[in-house]
């Protein structure tokens, strides 16, 4: 006995086609256009055009090179800070670490140390401070925001206790290369260091098992722990790397300024965290990309440099940075709920 041929009513076929269109994954182009990184590129292009129209000095290649000094040291710290926030932790003490590392480098320079020893002192101080933060969070179970708020005051306070209101200006010859030297043409050495670190962190976060485990920890530390991931070990290493990057930023900043004082880098923690969150890294962890952080760093550097060319006062720039921090936390939530953008997960 032959089976009867299947028949489909027109309304059923139309409904099935509508369901398939709704559930089908978006195309690659649609994913790019709806990504947070694409929005940052659009904002950067708009800011670049606005600054070039507002000031005749903006498009000079050496002025653009000088603009990178406004954000490079902060961006160096923002890279590991992004990994730390993706892993559902945060470090508020980075500016205090930069100040203490600068003071220790000043003492080493006063003792007659060579330029490379002075630099190693800065890196070592940053690494030690990061390890203290990591130990407080992972061994003594102190919440990260509480522990690092405490060490923020501790590190800068130690700097003031050692140096007081004095300024150290005598550094050995050769030390200035980190903050004032150029690697090739208008490309400064510290910006070249930032680009190299950005490539390294992008590979680690998006192409290695370490990165996949960080996303797993950020999405659910409990599930990650029961999956065999050494959650506390990863967190300790992240705090140590953030401290080491803060030491490197201190080397570049002290070298560029040619002087040491405990009051340097005040308020940088706000700008660094703004840079990370503006780059699409979720403050709740588990979401973010290094490309977004790099674009956010370039955008913030463009904004501050453009405002500087227009002689906008520093207090107004602080208002702009504070407004950006509020906007980048609230706007993505609204746009994501409306289905306009898709947050990055890898």
Image (tube, rainbow, N blue to C red):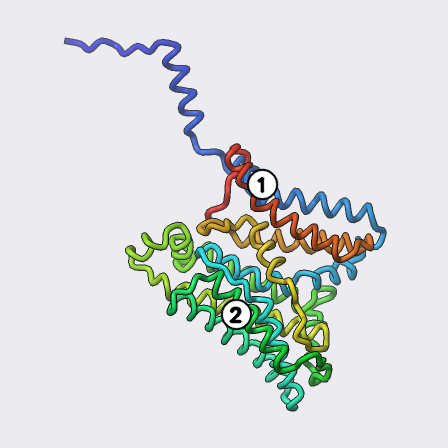
Check disc 1 and report its element: helix, strand or loop.
helix
Q: Which is in the foreground here, disc 1 or disc 2?
A: 2
Above or below, comparing residue 221 to residue 1 in the picture: below
Q: Residues within 10 Å of mark 1 (few under 14, many from 20)?
A: few
Q: Position of residue 293 (x, y in %)?
A: 57, 54
Corner quadrant of residue 8: top left
The residue at 52%/70% (across/down) is 151
Q: Where 315 falls versus 260 (above or below)?
A: above
Q: Are marks 1 and 2 in contact (CB under 8 Å)?
A: no
Quickly name the residue at label 2: 151
Tell me: 197 left or right of 206. right
Specify whether 26 is left or right of 111: left
Marker disc for residue 331:
1
Which residue shows up at 41% across the image and 15% down it? Answer: 14
Residue drawn at (58%, 45%) of the image: 37
**Badge 2, how many Cα within 10 Å: few under 14, some, many 20+?**
many
Instruction: Check the picture and name the quadrant holding the N terminus.
Output: top left
Of residues 38 and 331, the one nearer the viewer is 331
Please, is residue 64 above or below residue 338 in the view? Answer: below
């Amino acid at each position: 006995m032959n089976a009867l041929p299947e028949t489909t009513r027109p309304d059923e076929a139309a409904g099935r086609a509508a369901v398939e269109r709704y559930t089908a994954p978006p195309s690659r182009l649609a994913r790019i256009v709806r990504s947070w990184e694409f929005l940052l590129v659009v904002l950067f292009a708009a800011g670049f055009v606005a600054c070039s129209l507002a000031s005749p000095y903006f498009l000079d290649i050496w002025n653009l090179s000088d603009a990178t000094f406004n954000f490079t040291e902060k961006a160096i710290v923002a890279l590991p800070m992004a990994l730390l926030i993706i892993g559902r932790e945060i470090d508020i003490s980075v500016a205090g670490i930069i100040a203490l590392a600068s003071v220790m480098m000043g003492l080493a320079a006063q003792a007659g140390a060579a330029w490379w020893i002075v630099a190693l002192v800065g890196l070592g101080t940053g690494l030690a401070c990061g390890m203290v933060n990591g130990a407080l969070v992972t061994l003594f179970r102190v919440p990260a925001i509480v522990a690092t708020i405490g060490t923020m005051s501790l590190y800068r306070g130690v700097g003031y206790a050692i140096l007081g209101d004095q300024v150290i200006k005598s550094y050995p010859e050769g030390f200035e290369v980190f903050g004032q030297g150029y690697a090739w043409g208008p490309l400064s050495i510290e910006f070249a260091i930032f680009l190299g670190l950005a490539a390294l962190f992008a590979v680690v976060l998006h192409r290695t098992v370490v990165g996949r485990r960080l996303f797993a920890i950020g999405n659910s530390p409990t599930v990650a722990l029961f999956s065999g991931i050494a959650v506390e070990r990863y967190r300790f290493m992240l705090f140590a790397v953030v401290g080491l990057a803060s030491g490197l930023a201190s080397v570049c900043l002290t070298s560029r300024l040619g002087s040491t004082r405990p009051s340097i880098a005040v308020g940088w923690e706000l700008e660094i965290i703004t840079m990370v969150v503006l780059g699409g890294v979720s403050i709740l962890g588990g979401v973010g990309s290094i490309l977004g952080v790099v674009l956010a760093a370039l955008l913030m550097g463009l904004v501050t440099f453009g405002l500087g060319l227009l002689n906008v006062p520093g207090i107004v720039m602080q208002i702009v940075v504070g407004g950006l921090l509020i906007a980048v936390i609230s706007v993505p939530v609204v746009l994501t709920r409306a289905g306009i953008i898709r947050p990055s997960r890898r």
